[in-house]
Image (cartoon, coloured by chain):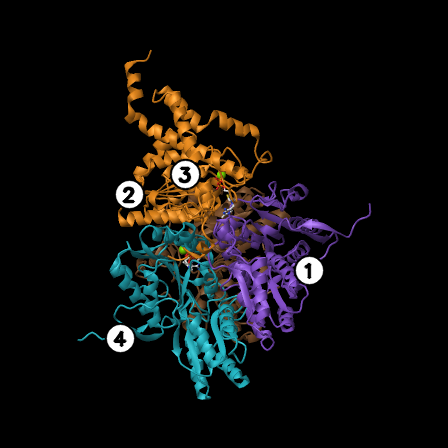
Chain colours: A orange, B brown, C cyan, D purple
Amino acid sequence: MTTATEQNKVIDGVKAEPWMRMYRRMVIIRLFEEQVNDLYTRALMPGLAHLYSGEEAVAVGICEALRQTDYITSTHRGHGHCLAKGAAPDRMFAELLGKRAGYCKGKGGSMHIADPASGNLGANAIVGGSAGIATGAALSAKRLGKGQVAVCFFGEGALGQGVLYEVMNLAALWKLPVIYACENNLYNEYTHYSETTAGDILARGPAFGVPAESVDGQDVRAVYSTAQRLVERARKGEGPAFLVCNTYRYTGHHVGDINREYYRSKQEEQEWKTKRDPIKNLTAWLIEQKYAEKAKLDEIENEVRAEMKAAVEFAITAPYPSPEEAQEDVYA
Amino acid sequence: MTTATEQNKVIDGVKAEPWMRMYRRMVIIRLFEEQVNDLYTRALMPGLAHLYSGEEAVAVGICEALRQTDYITSTHRGHGHCLAKGAAPDRMFAELLGKRAGYCKGKGGSMHIADPASGNLGANAIVGGSAGIATGAALSAKRLGKGQVAVCFFGEGALGQGVLYEVMNLAALWKLPVIYACENNLYNEYTHYSETTAGDILARGPAFGVPAESVDGQDVRAVYSTAQRLVERARKGEGPAFLVCNTYRYTGHHVGDINREYYRSKQEEQEWKTKRDPIKNLTAWLIEQKYAEKAKLDEIENEVRAEMKAAVEFAITAPYPSPEEAQEDVYA
Amino acid sequence: MPEIATRELTFAQAVREALAEEMRRDTRVCIFGEDVAEAGTPFKVLSGLVEEFGRERVLDTPISEAGFTGMGVGAAMTGLRPVVDIMFGDFLTLTMDQLVNQAAKVHYMSGGTWKVPMVLRTTLGATRRSAAQHSQSLHAWLSHVPGLKVAMPSTPYDAKGLLKTAIRDENPVVFFEDKMMYKLKGPVPEKDYTIPFGVADVKREGEDVTIVATSSMVQVALGAAELLEKIGISAEVIDPRTTWPLDEKTLVESAKKTSRAIVVDEGYGRYGVTGEIASVIAEGAFYNLEVPVKRMGAMHVPIPFSPPLEDVTVPTEQTVFEAARGFCEKG
Amino acid sequence: MPEIATRELTFAQAVREALAEEMRRDTRVCIFGEDVAEAGTPFKVLSGLVEEFGRERVLDTPISEAGFTGMGVGAAMTGLRPVVDIMFGDFLTLTMDQLVNQAAKVHYMSGGTWKVPMVLRTTLGATRRSAAQHSQSLHAWLSHVPGLKVAMPSTPYDAKGLLKTAIRDENPVVFFEDKMMYKLKGPVPEKDYTIPFGVADVKREGEDVTIVATSSMVQVALGAAELLEKIGISAEVIDPRTTWPLDEKTLVESAKKTSRAIVVDEGYGRYGVTGEIASVIAEGAFYNLEVPVKRMGAMHVPIPFSPPLEDVTVPTEQTVFEAARGFCEKG
Ligand SMILES: Cc1ncc(C[n+]2csc(CCOP(=O)(O)OP(=O)(O)O)c2C)c(N)n1
Ligand SMILES: Cc1ncc(C[n+]2csc(CCOP(=O)(O)OP(=O)(O)O)c2C)c(N)n1
Ligand SMILES: [Mg+2]
Ligand SMILES: [Mg+2]
């Protein structure tokens, strides 16, 4: 027997709606990556891909705090960012397979998906390579007075790239609306970040005049509320922020990185997957809050799974670009 | 009438000796730069030069804490570092005039003086360009177990170069014996550092695991004692340090920078020259401590002036390299 | 008094006028770099711009070439038209990732959806007694990279016209100014005009030998042509004006006509601009050339400081004159 | 069992063997780069080295290419013999200041007093479906710079011999390995041997056409030569092995003999290696060439991801074969 207030919650779409949307988004990313791994193992995908599985709450929590017209820059591990900002799975799969229907007409592949419609300035295969781009977009936003904010996603490995500090310093001097979102998933490829990162990561923002915060990257509610605060602050003209999200990648550095024992234990992986899974945890909370019943959430998952299957099919059957197209789009 | 103890001091060569040496070194640098400016105004020097006048206590105080076998890297404003580490004025002047007798056979000029005999890895015309070199030298020192320390001199403008933070992080991770000596003379060329540097400069060391200290760069005694502590710490294997020396350049960014009112006031220059001159202040202290009488100090100054004149004469009469030499020394 | 159509300006004034006119025409155009505002750069090329356009549009940066070049890319993608100032071409070494992996590739990698209308102005040229790290001419590197355009003005007139074209171009353009040419005077129309990229300019017509030269080497070639005329040799001097796009046709046609060609460029002689242009001519005019194409670039050494050394590392009127003379005697 | 003089090794094994032997011979030799220790690099080229030589000599670095390359310069100046590992040649963009303004110039600027015995190992080559930022071949940039040497092995044998020479050289050497060749097998002597720089290798003798090729393009050229033989055309395949120093004589002599030359290199086709080598041949063999030197490089576009696109951007056995055939018909 449930109380009236609890009753309310279940029907209270307004309260529930953003959380349900974030739930769906995280499930989309999780199942998208499942398909990517499947495409790789079935040898249907050229090259490699870096899966975002396990880190969904970071992209989804932060992008929930953004408007469509806000900008993001992404990384080699970028599928989650693109999806969270609103890219369509079918055109993303098409890009991953090098098809003309892809976001980049097949020219970019997994590491370069870009989408002006959703403010996605592009994924980047150079670690730290988009720090300048995101900061420059923030300069435009400020100069042109469009009230936009730019979010620069990067892994903790990018903390090794000096250019990051060069632009943080500039963003602080010029009070630019940019959020430096560091996804600390503990590893730079096959090396633990503690072997590559001295001092205190959080101190690296303030040293360049950029306020820093850290958040549990497996808790989408914490990510969202922190991001919202920092984004609004930036939008108001109060300058940049450095947000460290502590998270974990469930699978290999890329789809081909199968045997990982030499750099991390199966047990470590298990603990993150079982105790700190962002989707499981949000699921539990949604049910506990009576925002949704388990059945409803499973239904969403099944819908998404079907969508992903259809999107993959679309990509598989889509045509390749013709060889002459290699010479197009070099110059605008 | 002086007391016995005071009497002692005057004759106490041991106590006085290092201070007298530092006094002489600072005077050498000051008068060397006077000659450089003179060579420029007499149109005897090709190109330009960046004078160290006003910053003498930094190079002298730090190099006093070093052994001959220790390493330094220097900057475009490097004459003071080279002299403080033990380079000979005559061969330096010869280099500034592009003569074969110069430290670089005339190939380097003012911005590239290098001298293996005094551990000088070379001045560098790329701002921040020697941060990697100095850190690499510290890696050799550690690996080869020679107990050497490397000092990387750079201006506060180099804080804009990301590579500095890349190598600081590495020096901290690997506990390398390197001191990052930041000469904050307030200006990056014609721009005040406050317009180019956000946050807290001192925080930039610890953010990368490198302990930081700042010191009055016009007080050679303070510079020396701080440097000695940090150098010994590094020598013992306790890792790098970041030392900010607050100082001021008396003249233009380079010898041709005459009208400076648009970026700094004559009054500001006057205050530094009158109230905070490192040589004047050491002079007063030496006399007050009875380490030397004014006459003795003047005598030293006159000796040095004569040396500089002779050194310049040597350089002016020295022969140029022959054109064929342009093709030598490209490869070892 | 009546407005005159053309007057003499220095190369530096022509660059400044192009920037000022474009900034008046289009408020999205902005400048950033080190000491570009009140200082107007060490070469004083930008003097007066901050006074007219304010610090909002003429921004002094920290000494962070990689950082602010990257910001130029992002700003260009999102609505501004940045003109990034890199004081010495030698510092391009610090911007290569932003220029080559980002600016040059964004349009292509995004399948043509994002554009990077950015101009990067920088310098080249030796003999300023600035030694190895302040004297290089590294334009060959950028000409090698698809996605970039590279302009190399040789006169005040070309500087104004090419810079306006660069600023209006939808692609990243690297614009090289020889710091030794800033005081060079020449006629420059007051009116607004642009010079198309990929169109070489015959700076002097001739019959006996073609001298293809870039940037300040055009002035050197013209001087050599004067000397050659005195001994009865008629030299045609051609300036590609942009190394990419490259006007192959004009170069080849001239070489076909004269049957002899010399390529003069201030970059290092090996694996650079002279190799590309000489190859284009050797292939295009293969059946007309009487002698091999001669290449003259910087000596394959870091630029030395000492004047007697530095002076022998770059082509001069005299060395170009002698090369051409030797040539025509052969032929 | 008796020790055999030679056995088949992959290109990767040959590189590893050269490093291991040099590290045993000289304790000053050390390696640093990203994921070089336990991971042995993503290409597994260094597997096993950290186990033998320890983390003192095989050091994992942060993702700081500029920083640790600069450290390589300083370490080399002061007594170590560092072998710096830059995972993808595309990341050279981040190291250009350290390589070009520092490593290449230290010896010269210091009047010959300091030396930089450093090796920078990196990769090149497309068709790995890695897209525009992980597929470039940027060796032309380094070949353009005086003070550097550039090695480009095309076989396991050359890889071992050239790498040993590089490590023993007193100058900075940039060593390019085509990542698509790591699994290529070939005979490699167990004994210690070195291959001198600046000596081209005739990989296949022929009479009708000279194909000068670098790195993996040598394999492409050899494949094309097989196809050509079937139609009665005898191709000579020449591998310069180092683009700097460059063995001009061997290239020119071969072109004089065959009177036809093709240059095949995987770098971008414009302002790169093909231009330099074609110019050297066009000048040196001017009076012997029956047709213009043909240049084949990467298409002037950023490398696309999609297989049907990427495959047309680089020279292949088929395209080289067709070029050579067209050629010999002409002649
Ligand atoms: C400048 C640069 N150096 C090296 C690489 C090779 N690389 C690709 S991903 C990666 C590790 C990145 O780690 P991190 O930034 O933490 O991102 P994560 O993969 O953990 O999401 C490296 C070294 C690169 N792409 N760019
Ligand atoms: C990478 C780089 N960018 C720009 C310059 C041009 N430049 C030479 S000195 C200088 C200012 C340096 O200021 P700072 O580091 O504080 O040294 P200071 O001159 O004050 O001693 C600049 C911008 C350079 N030499 N190198
Ligand atoms: Mg990581
Ligand atoms: Mg300063």
Residue B221: tell me if it is visible: no
- The residue at 41%/38% (across/down) is A89
Above or below, comparing residue A27 to residue A139 in the picture? above
Asked if badges 4 and 2 are on one and the same chain, I answer no
Q: Disc 2 or disc 3, which is closer to the eye? A: 3
Mark 3: amino acid? Pro
Residue beneath disc 1 = D195
Q: Secondary structure at mark 1?
A: loop
Q: Position of residue D99 (x, y in %)?
A: 53, 57
**Amino acid type shown at disc 2:** Gly
Above or below residue A37? Residue B196 is below
Question: How far separated are the C-alphas under marks 1 and 2?
Answer: 62 Å
Q: CA distance from mark 2 to mark 3?
A: 34 Å
**Residue extending furthest toward the top:** A1
Q: Which mark is residue A176?
A: none
* Residue bearing mark 4: C6
Classed neighbour count for the residue bearing mark 2: other residues with Cα under 10 Å, few (<14), some (14–19), many (≥20): some
The chain carrying label 3 is A
Reading the image, the residue beneath label 2 is: A237
Question: Residue C259 location, x and y as percent?
Answer: 49, 80
Image coords of residue D252 (percent x, y): 62, 71
Q: Report if the beta carbon of the residue with label 2 is closer than 8 angstroms to ligand 2.
A: no
Q: Nearer the viewer, mark 4 or mark 3?
A: 3
Point 61% across, 65% down: residue: D211
CB at mark 1 closer than 8 A to ligand 1? no
Q: Tell me: B201 left or right of B74.
A: left
| Letter of the chain that mark 1 sits on in the rendering | D
Query: Do callouts 2 and 3 point to residues on the same chain?
Result: yes
Q: Chain of mark 2?
A: A
Point out residue A24 in the picture as x, y percentages from the top left corner: 38, 30
* Ligand 2: quadrant of the figure: bottom left
Q: Is residue D156 visible?
A: yes
